[in-house]
Amino acid sequence: MEGRVSMDIQQASLEQDTSRCKNEMISGPTERVEQRIQSNARYMKREDQPYITAGTAEVTRPSLNSTRSTATSNGEEWRGKRDNPVSAEQSFKRLQSHENRMQDTPSIAERDESARWREQCTKLQEDKRKIERSFNRYVNDMDRHLDNMDEDTRRLQAKIEQLESDKLAIEEKHNAFIQKQQEVTFSQMTTSHWRPAEDRKVMGDFDRLKRDMRSWAKKAGILNDMASVLSPLDDSASAALRGTLERVVQFRDDNTLPNGLVRSKKKPGLLLNALLSHGIYTTLFRSPFFFAERNIEGQSSRLDCRDGLEEVYDYGILSNEENAHLWRSQTLRLLFPPIETDISNGEVALHEITKEAIAEVANQQASKFLAGPARYLIANEAREKIYTIHREAATMSYNLWTRRTRMKCYTLQSLNRPTFDPDDKHLLSHSSVDYESHEDRLIGKPIDVIVHPLVMVYGTDDGENYQQGRVWAPAEVWLDSKSPSA
């Protein structure tokens, strides 16, 4: 806009200068013509008048001869023109034509100046068009940007509304959780003994139990190969040992042990560890009422109610699983009340009865294991250590069953001929398996030995989600990494 105003001012100034120049160009010749006419007229008057004095005439005559002759000729010419109207009219027309030419024909400087201004005007107009195009593009871009911002604003607004809704839902869920946790905390203030341990601690307890069993089997096992172990046995003893080993070993199709178990002198200790783990988990962990045996080694137990408790528990699971697990948890807590300052005499007596029953079952199972077919793999019983392992396992099992979660143990039979998968979180290869050197050959190969059963837990301590399970102790497996798969 400022450029246009400046250009208009400059054009107006140019027009004024051009008009003034034209007037000067026209008025100049016209004034000279009029002066010439007046000069001729004065000479003509002087010629008609006589000279006043002779002296003056004599003095002026010589100097005026040329002027007089010129004036006379000019006067005659002017009188001729004056007396001839056609000639005067033509002279006027010529003068007017000259004036028109002066008006119509600008000078070179004016033409250059005009051309320069036209060039600048053209450039300014082109710049104006460029600016207009650029401005239009900018306006269009801004319109699109505003449209995009509007769309983003609508989308963000919708997201904000969704987040607000999610926030309210989370707050409600959080408040409900806090309320529930407070209720649980208040309910456990007087029974902190039964507060459930974290899964991390439970898994650590299983690892410790596993290490104790491995250590005992390594020290107690026969340092010889299985061929040397089986050769001196009679048919009855050999069949009994084979029947026991079938619980943890996947025999070949020809009813023989896998080749990797026959050649090595360390494998009797591995099989002894597998038999010990299988016995402990199937007798002390599989049932929550393992301690209430009717008869142990011909002796009557003071808690002669296992069959009845298990029957009620099984029917309860079929009817209402959540309530059945709650009943089982409360029953076990009732039968084994914690020793506290305000405990009654009856609770003390019941506590001792249950504690004694747990220890009796553990000791009897240890004795049964040492007297069973596994004795053919034992060189040094280390009786005190194996009894301690059974008692600790029994106490651990009882405490875990007092929780509202449900525990399950999976052996070779219940796993249904498993195959090796290194990515399976339910399986863990034994330390003697050279997996890294034979990875391609071992993947998908049938597992030969379950050294440690798989222990799973289902549900939560709040008595919910019993369809969801998690691993407490993975199954420790062995397979021959030196022989090709069948």
Image: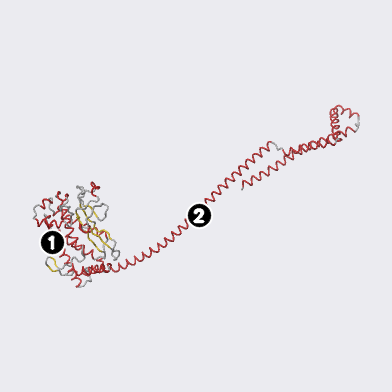
Q: Secondary structure at mark 2?
A: helix
The residue shown at (41%, 63%) is 165
Residue 15 location, quadrant = top right
Measured as percent of width and height from the top left, residue 468 is found at 29, 61
Nearest to N terminus: mark 2 or mark 1: 2
Furthest residue to the top?
Answer: 62
- What numbered label is drawn on residue 285? none
Measured as percent of width and height from the top left, residue 325 is found at 26, 67
Q: Which residue is mark 2?
A: 147
Task: Give left or right: position of 484 versus 175.
Answer: left
Which amino acid is tagged 2? Asp
Which amino acid is tagged 1? Lys
Frontmost residue, 449 versus 135: 449
The residue shown at (88%, 32%) is 47
Alpha carbons under labels 2 and 1: distance apart: 83 Å
Task: Give left or right: position of 13 versus 184.
Answer: right
Measured as percent of width and height from the top left, residue 162 is found at 42, 61
Measured as percent of width and height from the top left, residue 115 is found at 65, 39
Q: Which residue is mark 1?
A: 368
